[in-house]
Amino acid sequence: MANVRFDVKLEEQINYTNDTSNFSTSINSHLPDPSLGFANDSTGSDVLNVIEKFLNNSQTPICGSSVFILLKRNPDVIQTNEIVRKLQENHVFVRTIGMNSLLGGSVSPILYNISSETNGLFIYADSDSIDESVDDCTNNILNQYLLYSTNPIVSGKGQMELPLLQTPDYFEQTLSVFIDITVQNHPLTDNFHLLNLTLTDTHENYQTVLIDKDNIWNFNGYYSTFIFLKSKQDFDVTLTYDYGSAAQESLEIRMSINQAIPNWPPYGN
């Protein structure tokens, strides 16, 4: 476990520990403090430097890690191919909570792209929903084994077939699968109406996950739920979508379980 504050005037060192009590103490004693941060709103974030230091550290293994980021400003760096390569090479998942209006000099969705391309997730939040978004972003701690990941691009209304889902061969007949989805690669707009994700096995049994903005209280563009699927099965995955314009929208669809799996899901980029 490790934690660090970034975007501070005096750079801080990453704290590494194997003790949960020490980890909690370090978190609570290094909470965000605006008085320590950059004075200029246009200054770019140094979060990519922090990620690089974590990837290059000699104190703890990094393979299969989840990196949780609370982001208030964008980095200025645009070229991220090398850091994405390192993250993918080590199967490090980046899950980010980003404020709806990010500070910094860049308007490019840099951390969204990094999160999405590493099979992580990016959740947009405002000051009123930040606590809920932190809970959402860290949901995978109890379901840490990624089973399925895809980043479809859609526009308008339609239906598309997504990559096949294959559940592992476990002793249990049924698997509890945690699904989390983001519906846009920017703060939620009225352009989104609904999504319907359908999973159909070889015996024509199916389950659906419906995301209807009008029927979800205080919806912020992120949705999660549990479904139960049979083990050792192939599932066709179909996405039906309804957006209010022809503009392209990027989605993130993740499925995780609480048991180890034999293979890493492929990357979609």
Image (tube, helix red, strand yellow):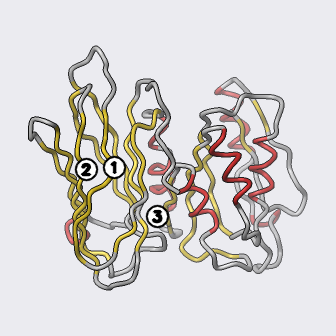
Q: Between tags 2 and 3, which lies in front?
A: 2
Q: Position of residue 235 (x, y in %)?
A: 23, 40
- Label 3 sits on what residue type? Ser
Residue 2 found in image quarter: top right
Identify the image quadrant of residue 196: bottom left
Counting residues from the N terminus, which is met first, the one under dot 3 or under dot 1?
Answer: 3
Q: Position of residue 198 (x, y in %)?
A: 19, 52
Residue at position x 48%, y 73% in the image:
186
Disc 3 element: loop
| Contact flag, marks 2 and 1 (Cβ < 8 Å) | yes
**Alpha carbon separation for disc pair 3 and 1:** 32 Å
What residue is disc 1 on? Answer: 163
- What residue is at 82 percent from the left and 63 percent from the top? 36
Q: Amino acid at mark 2?
A: Val
**Which residue reaches farthest left?**
204
Q: CA distance from mark 2 to mark 3?
A: 31 Å
Q: Contact, CB < 8 Å: mark 2 with mark 3? A: no
Q: In this view of the protein, which residue sits in the foreground, 148 or 222?
A: 148
Report the residue marked by disc 3.
129
In the rendering, which numbered label is found on residue 237? 2
